Image: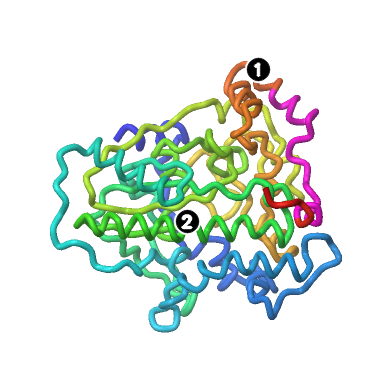
Amino acid sequence: MKSQSYLTKEFDIQNDFERFDAKNDIFNRALWDEKVKPKDFFTSYDIANYKPKKSKGFDHWDYALRNASWHMTDVVGELKFETEGRVEGFTDYYSINRPGSKNKVSISSSTETSMRLKKAAVTLGAGSAGICSIDERWIYSHQFSRKNGESRPMDLPKSLKFALVFTMPMNYQLGQTFPAALSGTATGDGYARCLNTANALAQFITNLGYEAVASMNDTGLNIPMAIEAGLGEYGRHGLLITPKFGPNVRIAKVFTDLPLEIDAPVDFGVKQFCNVCRKCADACPVKAIPQGDPESKPPNFSSLKGIKKWTVNAEKCFKFWVGMNTDCAICIRVCPYNKDYSKWWNRIGLKLAGGPLRSVMIWLDRVLKYGERKKPEKWWRESIK
């Protein structure tokens, strides 16, 4: 497949490459690895256990809104936790869809089918959608149970051949307050909307008589699949950068056997831009984002090896999150690609970033003070438009 060979070449994937074991994900390691101490991070998502801070953005109002934004994702995701140990959306794919049609819809064109599926995705809330074939390199080798701490081989049905990958834009104004308990609402809300869109799309495909499995952070790596599906490029901060929303997105996917036409990767100059821009690396409080060139050796086993790329040090990053009791995302806030692209002048900036005048874009970003943190109390005081 063209998109798969693109990633092989673009990231110089080597012979010692290994599929990722979900047990080594930094959030899962926090449950079994003594080196990764979560302290109050997870328990703070129960409002009974939040601990307000003197810092603005961490009071009762802020935690109440953040935790509320996660409510449906947590409740739906843990419906089968006690009986089966599943945390759907994060360690296990979703299994909440109803049976579909016994008859398969008539398909005359995979191109037409793909167009309809992407239109359905956007109609159901996605910011953008693309299609890739399932590349086993990005599917986890093993799943991890947060209930009993055991690993088991990945059980994604082999009959599924394609993935519809979609982005979900996060609230730009809330994201300007990162890092704070308040801004964690942007993350929680993004996941909640991914939950709805992914499962609605899976039900749509099932209703057509085909197989479909909805997935968020579980089952496989979202970013390489999103790149293969033509949704964006890889940034220095280890995030997907999209041409419509920058890095300010969450990603989800639906695996299916519905015959589809895959999309091609896109190139709008992100790699060249990140080669000269180090704003995210400079802004990272714990220096978890690399300043240098892409490397094949990861900083620890919570990242892929045998693939040449910029890799964030997950241990440093998560330790900072734990210290705040919320997610950080300073790297998203300060990224020059993080703009409101409904504004024409920001779209001009996007074109500058993709060409030989990218240094002008970096200069303008600094002079115009994009990426500066908005005070959380200012967000609360702003009127609803």
Secondary structure of the residue carrying tag 2 is helix
Give the camera-side residue of 151 and 159.
159
Viewer-nearest of discs 1 and 2:
2
Q: Magenta segment range?
A: 361-379
Where residue 331 appears, as percent x and y from the top left, is 68, 45
Residue in front for this viewpoint, 31 or 351: 351
Q: Give residue 324's quadrant in the image.
A: bottom right
Report if residue 18 is visible in the image: yes
Residue 255 disc label: none
Residue 357's disc is 1
Quarter assignment of residue 130: top left
- The vertical placement of 98 against 117, above or below, is below
Q: Which residue corresponds to mark 2?
A: 194
- Mark 1 lies on a secondary structure that is loop
Q: Amino acid at mark 1?
A: Leu
Q: Residue at x 73, y 47 (%)?
A: 284
**Which residue lies most toward the right here?**
54
